[in-house]
Amino acid sequence: MSANTYQLTAKEKRFIGWHFIFAVAALAIGSLFGPFQAMEHAGWNFYDKFLNHFFHSYYEGLTLHGVLNALIWTTFFITGFLTFTMIYGLKRPLRYPKLNALGWWMMVVGLVTAAVPILRNQASVLYTFYPPMKAHPAFYIGVTLVVVGSWIEGYGFYLTYYQWRKENPNTRTPLISFMALITMVMWQIATLGAAAELLVDLIPWSLGLRAGLDPQLDRTYFWWTGHPLVYFWLLPAYMSWYAFLPRQAGGKLFSDSLARFSFWLFLLLSVPVGFHHQYVDPGVPEGWKMVHSLLTYSVFFPSMITAFTVVASLENAGRNRGGKGLLGWLAKLPWNDPSVLAQLLAGILFFFGGIGGLVNASYNINLVTHNTAWVPGHFHLTVGTGVTLTFMGILYWMVPYLTKRPLWCKKCAVVQVWLWFIGMIIFSNAMHVVGLLGAPRRTPLGAAPYIPEEWAGHLLRVGIGGVILLFAVYLFVAVMIGSVLTKKKLSEEPEPPVADSLLDPQTTPRWLDRWVPWLVGAAILLIIAYGPQLVYQISTAQFTSPPFDQIFGG
Amino acid sequence: MSNEQRPENENEQFEHPKGTAIIMAIFLLLIIILWGSVYLIMLSRGVTFYG
């Protein structure tokens, strides 16, 4: 064991582990409904045949899928992973563990509070909860508690970092903790929009304290949060690709400086881009849509830095393992390690998700894909694979680390990763293509009377892909449960695979470890990108839209 | 290489990531092809002129 390691206490491991237990449980339940929707598209409607005793509508299932997978699986996993990276990176316990425990309990209470109305079909408003569709107040309150709980865990990280910095004034912040802090800061800036929407508008409105809302204003609040939410999911995956995967593959991080620089750019650029989700909103002027379009394209820059640095680190690993020639090192990577395999395949599909993202960000050609099946096809490559498959890969080493038990059925884990990869290619490709042909999203297409013949084969592929993904997700859950329950014990304490950098991190420029200029820059950019439009939209808002709370039979 | 920018292990040699450069070039080419194909679909659906 190298001198660079740090032993977490059993209590700390349990605390982190409970985050992952809730995350995997949410994934297991939420993922059940994704394939049901995919199969519905293929004409196999289980909602009407078997599920109608338990679930009331396609949209109840779609809400469960979106909320549990996109909000709960991710937020619980990420707060657990960031807790680990803060403690292990700084090599010190949390400054105020009870504060973090309070945040955790608030998230759990919020989850239960939001789940009850969803399961009673009183909150079938999908995970974007656009007004004027109205949910039960408990749904909005529950979501708010989950977000505020994650903030409180973040405050615990900041106080821990503050203490560490006082004790280590001249040391570069360890990379994994540095990345965890930026992820949490970005999340706290990003969720200000949702906080305004929930606290000022949706909760009072759902409680009957306000008569009506202005949906345009609330869409603007939502997308302040909605797009950087994607980066809240992505940055922990990038953390793993930068700071863990190179070591797992047998190499070193190509550039500590590039990794830090890209994270600062993500902090600056991932929030002031929300209007690119509102290109067809009539209440947002075209000029501001164009500003956000250009800022969205600027996020391409740190994304390419990430792609280059991660692949270069893998090239270093492959060559260390004897790889020769321009691309011969690829074959030398440890493809039989399920954790590495999951992250490599996640990265490959994420490349294509990135290309689709550029299409979505383009002001003109977005009109071809907007509100079509292309969009869920796209985000199943990004959050559904780039993020989720990476998180699965992390758990394939994290669970043995936390439990000191070996991964149960390593071959099953390898099969699981390939199943996810193949299922997602089939599903996502079909969704992209049928979207280009005009198929709408968020629609039970199996019940639609207007399906043209040319969609049929693609919708069948959507269903087949969904079935394969169903097998993949439950194989993952089985490996997780088997690994936790196995009676076998590892003889030695496993070591987290934190990668060294090719260059000494202490040589990383000091300006890449200073917070104030970057935070000020992020604030200025936000004021420029959102300030004038928010002032205009709030001052001209018409709070007259009545609620639609019976639209899905709720 | 300056003294400030030395590898953690002085004996370690690292090559220029030529394979990475190839992969990035392929990626950029794919972006152009796939983005362009959607752009052509948009054009095939007709163009709206203002004014």
Image (cartoon, rainbow, N blue to C red):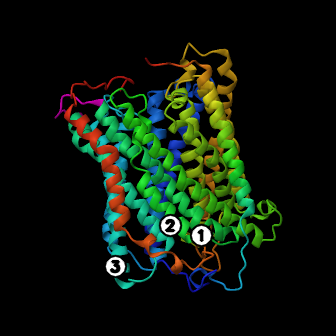
Highlighted magenta segment, given as a residue range: A206-215
The structure residue drawn at horizontal position 71% and vertical position 69%, both measured from the top left corner, is A316
The residue labelled by disc 1 is: A255
- The answer to which image quadrant residue A340 occupies is bottom right
The residue labelled by disc 2 is: A260
Mark 1 surroundings within 10 Å by alpha-carbon count, few (fewer than 14), some (14 through 19), many (20 or more): many
- Look at the picture and state if B6 lies above or below A156: below
Q: Amino acid at mark 1?
A: Ser
Mark 1: which secondary structure?
A: loop
- Look at the picture and state if A36 lies above or below A258: above
Residue A353 image point, x, y percent: 60, 44
A211 within the magenta span: yes
Label 1 to label 2, Cα distance in Å? 9 Å
Left-right relation of A448 to A79: right
Residue A222 image point, x, y percent: 35, 40
- The answer to which image quadrant residue A488 occupies is bottom right
Q: Name which of mark 1 and mark 2 comes first in the sequence.
A: 1
Left-right relation of A129 to A91: left
Mark 3: which secondary structure?
A: helix
**How many labels, in total?**
3
A277 within the magenta span: no
The residue labelled by disc 3 is: A163
The structure residue drawn at horizontal position 50% and vertical position 66%, both measured from the top left corner, is A260
